[in-house]
């Protein structure tokens, strides 16, 4: 490229400046089929699935006392076990935690008491997350209902 600039050949030839300028810049994204696929629903779905596929069949293993875990393929499990690793993850360990029962909370919209968030969502033809959003919002009358 330096040679072309110094000798003024190719696109750097002053007699051809107007010709090359008339060609325009890069091709637009609207005409590029690969760019269109990349941003389409199918392209986004394909790229989203790649992360999960890369860990298919692997298991998390860590050394006790360490906060780091590794995803290991089945052919390397024995090697890691011999080095003192165990299966699981130190980050989301349930050891020593008490499990509390998740009882259904009753929900009210100010007039009607529903047995659960799901029942309220079904009765109002919305999703459960919509009902939870209404409960958290201070602008609505929705709230959890506790029996006394």
Image (cartoon, rainbow, N blue to C red):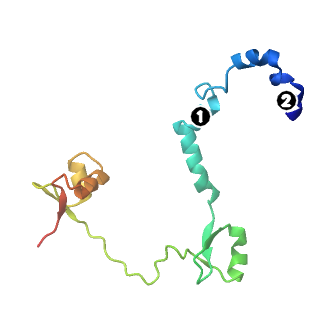
- Helix, strand or loop at mark 2: helix
Q: Position of residue 117 (x, y in %)?
A: 25, 58
Q: Nearer the viewer, residue 67 or 57?
A: 67
In the image, taking residue 30 as reference, residue 84 lies left or right, namely right
Q: Which label is found at residue 5?
A: 2
The residue under the point 60% across, 70% down is 60
The residue under the point 68% across, 68% down is 74
The quadrant the N terminus occupies is top right
Q: Position of residue 72 (x, y in %)?
A: 66, 68
Give residue 136's quadrant in the image. Answer: bottom left
The correct choice, above or below, for 1 with respect to 55 in the image is above
Q: Position of residue 92 (x, y in %)?
A: 49, 73
The residue under the point 61% across, 73% down is 69
Give residue 31's quadrant in the image. Answer: top right
Q: Nearer the viewer, residue 119 or 3?
A: 3
- Helix, strand or loop at mark 1: helix
The residue under the point 75% across, 19% down is 20
Q: Nearer the viewer, residue 144 or 19?
A: 19
In the image, taking residue 46 as reference, residue 129 lies left or right, namely left
In the image, taking residue 56 as reference, residue 12 lies left or right, namely right
For disc 1, the neighbor class at 10 Å (few under 14, some 14 to 19, many from 20) is few
Of mark 2 and mark 1, the one earlier in the sequence is: 2
The correct choice, above or below, for 102 with respect to 95 in the image is above
Rounded to the nearest angstrom, the CA distance separating label 2 from label 1 is 37 Å
Residue mark closest to the camera, 2 vs 1:
2
The correct choice, above or below, for 9 with respect to 19 in the image is below
The quadrant the C terminus occupies is bottom left
Which residue lies under the disc numbered 1? Answer: 37
């Amino acid at each position: 490229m330096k040679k072309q600039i110094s000798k003024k050949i190719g696109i750097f030839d002053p007699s051809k400046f107007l010709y090359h300028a008339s060609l325009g810049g890069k091709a637009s994204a609207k005409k590029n089929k690969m760019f269109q696929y990349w941003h389409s629903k199918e392209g986004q779905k394909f790229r989203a699935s790649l992360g999960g596929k890369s860990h298919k069949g692997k298991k998390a293993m860590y050394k006790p006392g360490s906060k780091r875990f590794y995803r290991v393929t089945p052919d390397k499990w024995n090697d890691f076990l011999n080095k003192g690793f165990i299966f699981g993850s130190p980050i989301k360990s349930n050891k020593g935690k008490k499990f509390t029962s998740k009882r259904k909370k009753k929900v009210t919209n100010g007039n009607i008491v529903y047995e659960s968030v799901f029942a309220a969502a079904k009765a109002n033809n919305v999703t459960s997350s919509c009902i939870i959003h209404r409960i958290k919002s201070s602008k609505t009358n929705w709230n959890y209902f506790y029996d006394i």
